[in-house]
Image (spheres, rainbow, N blue to C red):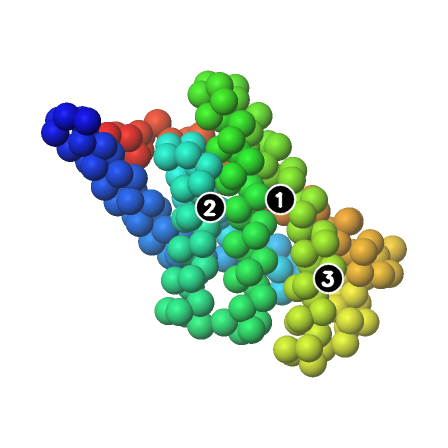
Amino acid sequence: MSSTAAYAKQAARTHRLAVAGMLSAVAFVLMYIEFPIPALIPAFIKLDVSDLPELLAAFALGPVWGVVVTLCKNVLFAILHGTSSNYVGELFNFLAGSVFAFTAGVIYHRGKSRRSALLGAVVGAALMALVSVPLNYFLVYPAYVKVYGMPMEAIIGMYQAINPGADNLMKCLVLFNVPFTFCKGMLDVLLCFLVYKPLSPILHK
């Protein structure tokens, strides 16, 4: 390999690391900007757009980099903000966000077109919503019951205050969390399509 090629390869690697670091920092900050939508879902579940930077990373740098940004933002949040869920919330965020970003990145990089980007993002958001069910059912909600000492019946009661038909945890997750998570992902997709082109000079060399 010539010195010019080696320099170009090193420069590209440095650029990817710099962009991933920047996007991780932005994602970390966005985790602080969250708000509830109590008319649609219990208030303890909040909306944020911190998955946006990892989606940008997956499109600009590759699917693995989307996962890297997801990991970095959660590690930063756990260290600098602290955890109130024995790291279960951060683990859930990492796993769900990784599914979203990695899926979107893989599909996009097979075609690298606006259409493949949209398809990848929609499929990624759908998979994230589906994966959230077993993660919440077997991991997150049992952990919250243990950490906060809140009976599962009380949690389900928060859902029933909105829809009385949600009389067990699985119904709560299917009726509320799945559509909420999918819509949350699609909001990130919309924002991604709005900001990707203006940010292209930064995201790409």
Out of 177 and 96, give the one closest to the viewer.
96
Estimate the x, y position of residue 72 in percent, counting from the top left: 40, 55
- Disc 3: which residue: 138
Three-letter amino acid code at the position of disc 3: Phe
**In what element is the residue under mark 3?**
helix
Out of 187 and 20, give the one closest to the viewer.
20
Three-letter amino acid code at the position of disc 2: Val
Estimate the x, y position of residue 100 in percent, counting from the top left: 55, 41
Residue at the (53%, 27%) spot, across then down: 107
Can you name the residue that lies furthest to the left here? 3
Q: Which is nearer the N-term, disc 3 or disc 1?
A: 1
Query: In this picture, is 92 found above or below 127?
Result: below
From the viewer's perspective, tell me whether residue 138 is left or right of residue 168.
left
Q: The C terminus lies in which quarter of the figure? A: top left
**In what element is the residue under mark 2?**
helix
Can you name the residue that lies furthest to the bottom here? 149
Query: In this picture, is 97 found above or below 139?
Result: above
Residue at the (55%, 55%) spot, across then down: 93
Q: Residues within 10 Å of mark 2 (few under 14, many from 20)?
A: many
From the viewer's perspective, tell me whether residue 60 is left or right of residue 4.
right
- Disc 1: which residue: 128
